[in-house]
Image: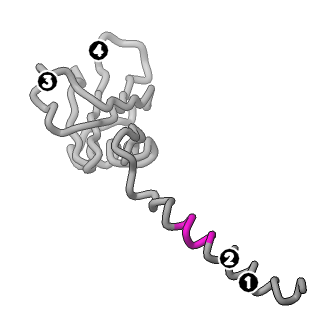
């Protein structure tokens, strides 16, 4: 009796697994309310470093003091239409007034910076 049911049970189990797989969308299809950054912090740091190198900005006397993710901007911000972004902060190695660089890295890998005064 059990040997007759085994193929049927195996088929039922396999069908259930296929059905469950259809219910779980691939990772690239994020839910509308998922705030996880498309660009990871590691990728944002790489983009910021490449951006600063492309702009020929010498960072030999600076270090990365932080990276922070923002998923929205104030309505008054002129770049609000670019969407979520990372800000990577470079600080001078020595304590001085000013000298920080703030690199904005957007999810499409575009970047821009302010600072360095």
User: What are the residue bounds of the magenta stretch?
Assistant: 16-21
Query: Going by the image, does 64 lie left or right of 48?
Result: right
Mark pair 4, 2: CA separation: 67 Å
Foreground: disc 3 or disc 4: 3
Mark pair 3, 1: CA separation: 62 Å
Q: Which mark is residue 12?
A: 2
Query: Going by the image, does 9 lie left or right of 34?
Result: right
Foreground: disc 4 or disc 2: 2
Instruction: Pick the residue in front: 95 or 90.
Output: 90
Q: Which residue is mark 4?
A: 98
Mark pair 1, 2: CA separation: 6 Å
Which residue is at 43% across, 31% downward? 64
Q: Secondary structure at mark 4?
A: loop
Label 1: how many Cα within 10 Å (few below 14, some 14–19, many 20+): few
Instruction: Pick the residue in front: 15 or 64.
Output: 15
Q: Which mark is residue 77?
A: 3
Which residue is at 26% across, 45% downward? 51
Mark pair 3, 4: CA separation: 23 Å
Q: Quadrant of residue 93?
A: top left
């Amino acid at each position: 009796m059990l040997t007759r049911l085994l193929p049927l049970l195996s088929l039922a189990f396999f069908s259930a697994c296929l059905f469950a797989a259809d219910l779980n969308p691939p990772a690239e299809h994020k839910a509308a309310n998922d705030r996880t950054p498309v660009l990871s912090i590691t990728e944002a740091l790489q983009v910021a470093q490449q951006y600063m190198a492309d702009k020929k900005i010498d960072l030999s006397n600076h270090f990365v003091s932080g990276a922070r993710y923002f998923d929205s901007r104030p309505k008054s911000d002129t770049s609000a239409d670019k969407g979520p972004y990372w800000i990577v902060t470079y600080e001078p190695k020595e304590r001085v007034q000013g000298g920080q660089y703030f690199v904005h890295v957007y999810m499409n890998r575009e970047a821009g910076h302010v600072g360095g005064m």
